[in-house]
Image: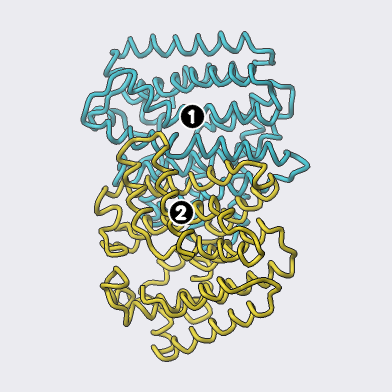
Chain colours: A yellow, B cyan
């Protein structure tokens, strides 16, 4: 899947580079897009489409759009008034380089442009109805009932204990719904039936939880040189996490359960799920 | 046009109230939506539709969407790292009441939800193609090539002199494009021909400039009890404004020129432009 990631990385920058806007804003937007990351969300779109026997590259505009939304959320989450992080993927965070005002506006710009990008897909490539469905689902996944609401609940969960079910809801909104959107976007583009779409969404639910548990584990025992951020930040913020609620071993067990459940669902799907399986393994075992 | 404004104010709150999200986030979003304001943008949509002989109320979802975008931009612009304003429309600004993190997230939530709202207009009311055109134009007007870019240029213009043409470009992006979107949205919904649409856009260009010049004049000689904000803030920030570049009398003359040009364009349009004329007068003579 590396050629797709290379193409995605190039297009993320090309797309922003050719827009007319103040140079500092452009640099700020590109800085965070360029900071890389695992590109899990674009990969999920690509792998889902290939599962349906389609060319994964047809998902490129949606992948660009999702990665812009994800990047904006990282920029805003890192701000001093939020998680107050200085490092992201081993590089200074956006506001450390460009200042708070520019970081906020770069986030706003990426968020807004992600919808423009979807609306501008030529109608002979993706039908009008499908484009609207993509826009609607992306907005739902990333808005107040999704990611934004999850970030609020996450911030409110600091310095107090939340139980396992609350923790799942918080992360389901903060990260799960956008991951689910990615497989759903693949299903929308492929014109999948309802049963397949629902099974894919269940699969995404499990890898979303696995993703978050792995994140919590890495905050305890990750290697900063690999994760690109300092460990122990959850403890400092007195945040409830899977390891704090279940012990480290308990969290690892829970992670394996979700990876297992995700793979079981893949086996039931009438698709070529090789690439989705690779991503599932990646999520469960990643060291960054 | 008062019944439409009453309906809009109710629906702004009803729409957010029925969503599922953390209570603090909801309160923060509703607080700023409720703070009122002149609702110039919704009025422009309404008046344009009525000009085409349509029921202005069919523009309600677009009006809600634009007002959410406008409100998000005010919340973010008021933040300490941006304009650092404590008062907006006579009330404490969002971050003064809910804190910076919540203010940023309330803005993000309103911005994202505005696109969801447009995507959810039933297709038997507005065709798929028209909805996509509305989403595309709204994103363009409010994104990095529009409002967000304008806010960056505006911040960068503090403490240094910009000339009249640069000032027009800054405000054209920061406020003009979203005002233009409103009349364009009316034209899209009405299925207007290219010539009429272009003339409406030229009209919007002039009222956008008139709006900004009036804003600058009010910052010099406005009555804080009426404007709901302190006067003299541009001078404190050493911002170039129409009065600072043209003198107060020169700015007033410029304002009249744009109001005159806007009305001349209205007279050339094959529409019933009574309501658009009322709004033009309102923009030129408003005291808040």
Q: Which residue, given by chain and number where applicable, does mark 2 sit on?
A: A7
Whole-number angstrom distance, CA of label 1 to CA of label 2: 33 Å
B9 in relation to A167, above or below:
above
Disc 1: CA contacts within 10 A as few (<14), some (14-19) or many (>=20): many
Quarter of the figure with the N terminus of chain B: top right
Residue B89: percent from left, percent from top: 43, 37
Q: Which of the two residues, B46 or A121, is positioned nearer the viewer here?
A: A121
From the top left corner, tell me how far across and down residue A259 is, in percent.
Answer: 53, 81
Query: What is the crowding at mark 2: few (fewer than 14 residues within 10 Å), some, or many (at least 20)?
Result: few
Give the answer, above or below, for where A35 lies relative to B146: below
Q: Could you tell me which chain the residue with mark 1 belongs to?
A: B
Using residue A136 as the reference point, say whether residue B286 is left or right of it: left
Circle 1 SS class: helix
Residue lying at 47% horizontally and 22% vertically, measured from the top left = B286
Name the image quarter holding residue A267.
bottom right
Residue at which label 1 appears: B177
Image quarter of the C terminus of chain B = top left
What element does badge 2 sit on? helix
x, y percent for residue A119: 59, 43
């Amino acid at each position: 899947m590396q050629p797709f990631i290379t193409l995605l990385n190039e297009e993320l920058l090309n797309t922003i580079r050719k827009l007319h806007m103040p140079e500092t804003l452009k640099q700020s937007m590109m800085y965070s897009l360029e900071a890389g990351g695992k590109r899990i969300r674009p990969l999920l779109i690509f792998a889902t489409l290939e599962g349906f026997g389609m060319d994964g590259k047809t998902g490129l505009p949606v992948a660009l759009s999702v990665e812009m939304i994800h990047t904006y959320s990282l920029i805003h989450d890192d701000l001093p008034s939020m998680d107050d992080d200085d490092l992201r993927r081993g590089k200074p965070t956006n506001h450390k380089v460009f200042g708070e005002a520019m970081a906020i506006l770069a986030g706003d710009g990426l968020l807004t442009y992600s919808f423009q990008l979807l609306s501008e897909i030529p109608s002979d490539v993706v039908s009008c109805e499908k484009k609207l469905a993509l826009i609607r689902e992306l907005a739902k996944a990333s808005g107040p009932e999704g990611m934004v609401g999850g970030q609020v609940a996450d911030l409110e969960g600091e310095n107090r204990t939340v139980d396992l079910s609350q923790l799942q809801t918080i992360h389901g909104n903060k990260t799960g719904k956008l991951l689910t959107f990615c497989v759903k976007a693949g299903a929308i583009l492929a014109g999948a039936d309802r049963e397949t779409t629902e099974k894919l969404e269940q699969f995404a639910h499990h890898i979303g939880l696995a993703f978050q548990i792995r994140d919590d584990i890495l905050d305890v025992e990750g290697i900063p040189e690999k994760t690109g951020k300092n460990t122990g930040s959850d403890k400092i913020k007195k945040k409830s996490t899977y390891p704090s609620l279940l012990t480290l071993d308990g969290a690892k067990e829970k992670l394996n359960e979700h990876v297992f459940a995700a793979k079981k669902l893949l086996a039931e799907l009438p698709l070529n799920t090789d690439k989705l399986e690779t991503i599932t393994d990646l999520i469960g075992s990643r060291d960054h």
